[in-house]
Image (tube, rainbow, N blue to C red):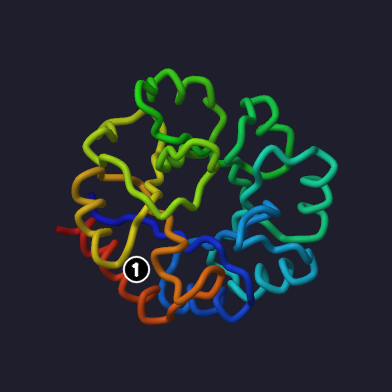
Amino acid sequence: MSSVQVKICGITNPQDAELAASAGADAIGMVFYPPSPRHVADLGVAREIAMAAGPFVSVLGLVVNSDRAFIEQLLDQVPLNMLQFHGDENESQCALYRVPFLKALRMKPGLDLEASFAQFGQARGILLDTYVKGVPGGTGESFNWNLVPHKPSKPLVLAGGLTPANVALAVQTARPTGVDVSGGVEREPGLKDPQKVREFIVNAKSGAVS
């Protein structure tokens, strides 16, 4: 593996979007899920965040069992490049929209990954996150990276409990296409720490090379 793509998720303000872009992030994510401490409730602010990422950073919108009307409104008002589904959505529900999608799978014991990949053949990729009962993501906990298949049928994004200190090992172990971090680069929920963001990106990409 020569490179890994890095997504900084849970962005709540334009300044952090600019920070992620300047630090070399390939993508940023915004959370549109009210129970999350990183929820972006104002779509006007969400648009400002998306624009602040600049022309070469992909902008993803994370949703959890959202209704179609809200997602259409979101896409009308915010220039998103991709949707990221973290709920119980099936493939037909994910594929309704004008942008490609990632589907998050939580690493519940006994999960048949390849069977799950087959259920989401239209997904641009699959995001693997830690399973915590009743929590759709953002747990801050990692899972056993050795469970990640090294020759998957879909591009994989690794999430869950990643930090600047462990991301290089995570990349070396799981060999994902990309990594996704939120809480691991924050100074408090929803506010990113510039040094942690920069260290995370450097360490993720160095882990892919080594």
Look at the picture and state if 15 lies above or below 110.
Answer: below
Q: Residue at x 63, y 46 (%)?
A: 83
Q: Is residue 98 left or right of residue 83?
A: right
Q: Is residue 76 left or right of residue 52?
A: right
Query: Type of residue at label 1?
Result: Ile
Residue 192: percent from the left, percent from the top? Answer: 49, 75
What quarter of the picture does the C terminus occupy? Answer: bottom left
Q: Does dot 1 land on a helix, a strand or a loop? A: helix
Residue 35: percent from the left, percent from the top? Answer: 66, 53
Quick one: which residue is furthest to the front in this view?
A: 133
Query: For the image shown, how many numbered marks are present on the structure?
Result: 1
Which residue carries the number 1 mark? Answer: 201
Quick one: which residue is furthest to the left in this view?
A: 210
Toward which corner of the image does residue 49 lie, by quadrant?
Answer: bottom right
Look at the picture and state if 196 lies above or below 175.
Answer: below
Q: Nearer the viewer, residue 130 or 13?
A: 130
Toward which corner of the image does residue 91 lie, by quadrant?
Answer: top right
At label 1, counting other C-alpha atoms closer than 10 Å, the crowd grade (few under 14, some 14-19, many 20 or more) is: many
Q: Residue at x 81, y 46 (%)?
A: 70
Q: Residue at x 49, y 52 (%)?
A: 138
Toward which corner of the image does residue 32 lie, by quadrant?
Answer: bottom right
Q: Is residue 40 left or right of residue 54?
A: right
Q: Residue at x 38, y 57 (%)?
A: 5
Look at the picture and state if 50 lies above or below 117.
Answer: below
Q: Is residue 71 left or right of residue 26?
A: right
Q: Nearer the viewer, residue 202 or 139?
A: 139
Residue 179: percent from the left, percent from the top? Answer: 38, 53
